[in-house]
């Protein structure tokens, strides 16, 4: 689950595990898990979880889940909202002035 953490005056987006609710601070220890959509063009709910929390998620859902590494998931997510590597590079250059 994406949440906002207040740090001083800054609102910082963070990801909390959808099973244990602890923050995910290292992408290497986390996955995006989901029930595979049943047909083309449909969507399904997606869960951000620690790798060790996958069994509890399957037990809670009562079905098998598919997954992808959190790193891959976030890369696809940014591209699917139009935030391509080129757009990121342009933003960085704009901030440099
Ligand atoms: Zn967890």
Image: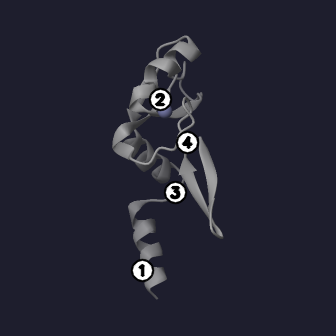
Q: How many marks?
A: 4
Q: Which residue is mark 2?
A: 33
Q: Nearer the viewer, mark 1 or mark 4?
A: 4
7 or 76: nearer the eye?
7
Picture residue at 39% right of the left edge, 62% below the top: 85
Residue 26 is marked as none
Q: Nearer the viewer, mark 3 or mark 2?
A: 2
Q: Which one is earlier in the sequence, the residue at label 3 or at label 2?
A: 2
Q: Which one is earlier in the sequence, the residue at label 4 or at label 2?
A: 4
| Label 4 close to label 3 by CB (< 8 Å) | no
Q: Which one is earlier in the sequence, the residue at label 2 or at label 1?
A: 2
Please say if 34 is above or below 8. Answer: above
Which type of secondary structure does the marked residue at label 2 adopt? strand
Q: Residues within 10 Å of mark 1 (few under 14, many from 20)?
A: few
- Ligand 1 within 8 Å of disc 3? The answer is no
Q: Nearer the viewer, mark 4 or mark 2?
A: 4
Residue 16 is marked as 4
């Amino acid at each position: 689950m994406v949440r906002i953490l207040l740090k001083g005056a800054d609102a910082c987006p963070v990801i909390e595990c959808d099973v244990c609710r602890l923050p995910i601070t290292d992408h290497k220890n986390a996955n995006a898990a989901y029930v595979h959509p049943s047909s083309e063009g449909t969507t399904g709910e997606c869960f951000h979880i620690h790798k060790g929390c996958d069994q509890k998620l399957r037990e809670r859902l009562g079905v098998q889940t598919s997954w992808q590494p959190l790193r891959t998931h976030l890369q696809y997510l940014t591209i699917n909202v139009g935030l391509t590597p080129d757009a990121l590079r342009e933003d960085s250059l704009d901030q440099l002035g």
